[in-house]
Image (spheres, rainbow, N blue to C red):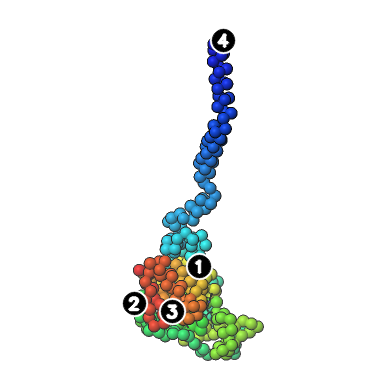
Amino acid sequence: MKDHQNRQIKVANSSRKWFTKPAVYVSVLILFYVLGYLSASCFNSQHPTSAVTAALTESPNHLSNTTDIAASGTGPSSAEHGHNLFGSRCAGPVSSKLVRQTILDRLFNGTSPYENFPPAQAFGLLKTKRIKGWGSNGAVFEKLIRKVKPRTIIEVGTFLGASATHMAGLTSRLGLKTQILCIDDFRGWPGFLDGRFRDIAMLNGDVFLLYQFMQNVVYLNLTESILPVPFSTGAALEKLCEWGVFGDLVEVDAGHDFHSAWSDINRAYKVLRPGGVIFGHDYFTSADNKGVRRAVNLFARVNGLRVKVDGQHWVIDSD
Ligand SMILES: C[S@@+](CC[C@H](N)C(=O)[O-])C[C@H]1O[C@@H](n2cnc3c(N)ncnc32)[C@H](O)[C@@H]1O
């Protein structure tokens, strides 16, 4: 018993001796520090920064159709900023026979906007016919209409209707029953009344561009084939997508700065029927440091599509 007690005292004394040695003391401290560090990094493996990075670098497969294509070419930083995400999938397509009625129901309470046209406040303020466009009769229109034989054309940017009425004339000559939807806010652009359009009437700050466009359509007897969609391009294209209204041929000719062209082309492509053709004017315009061309080329690159040039127009086939 005594022996046992003596042995315990000896062991205690010798370990006390060890811990009083400075080198051993420092080593034990380092050991505890390292163990503590390792366990902390194990528990903290979902560090907030790495979790966010993981979300941003996730495969875009879970995103919508349009987003997939746009995001895949440009990497995580684009996903982070969202500047090439253009909303969800469109609704299933409505039959082309129902496109006109869909627009009448959705936008004009089921009645034709040409009914009882012109309204009293426009009497005497409209020209019988006042049409002016830019490259609006180019050969590209006939080539594409002959090739696609469109039942629905969506025009993004119409102004006084030069290109829309030209396309309506072509489709009727080719015996096609084509509905042309003309998206335009019919405001022109700031200052456009200063120059050669000063003859377009204005009443209390409201320029009569929509009415003059409609008057042109009425005059040319094209009211059955042309409908205005008098809203901003972004809002209108999103709604067409939501309602399942697609075009076989989509023409983009609204804002000519990069950002306008970029969003118009992306949104317009969503409402292009598979197999259809999207095209637009002013591929070579110098506006906004060749904004249209930069937008078209970037769009083609991120979607793996090819840009063809026809005069001043760019053309992209969807397949
Ligand atoms: C160059 S003109 C269209 C010309 C027409 N395609 C032609 O060849 O006869 C551009 C039109 O786009 C419209 N526009 C520009 N930006 C728009 C926007 N964000 N929303 C709606 N319309 C817009 C303007 O009101 C203008 O009438």
Alpha carbon of mark 1 to alpha carbon of mark 2: how far? 27 Å
Identify the image quadrant of the N terminus.
top right
Kind of element beneath mark 1: helix
Which percent across, then down, holds residue 221?
46, 85
On the image, which quarter does residue 141 sit in?
Answer: bottom left
- The residue to which callout 2 is attached is 147
- Given the image, on which type of amino acid does mark 2 rest? Lys
- Residue 276: % across, % down: 38, 71
Q: CA distance from mark 1 to mark 4?
A: 94 Å
Percent coordinates x, y for residue 13 in the rendering: 57, 21
> To which residue does mark 3 refer?
283
Residue with the most extreme top position: 1
Mark 2 → mark 4, Cα distance in angstroms: 111 Å
- Mark 1 or 4 closer to N-term? 4
Q: Is residue 244 left or right of residue 124?
A: left
Residue 201 falls in which quadrant of the image? bottom right
Disc 1 and disc 2 in contact, CB within 8 angstroms: no
Q: CA distance from mark 3 to mark 4?
A: 104 Å
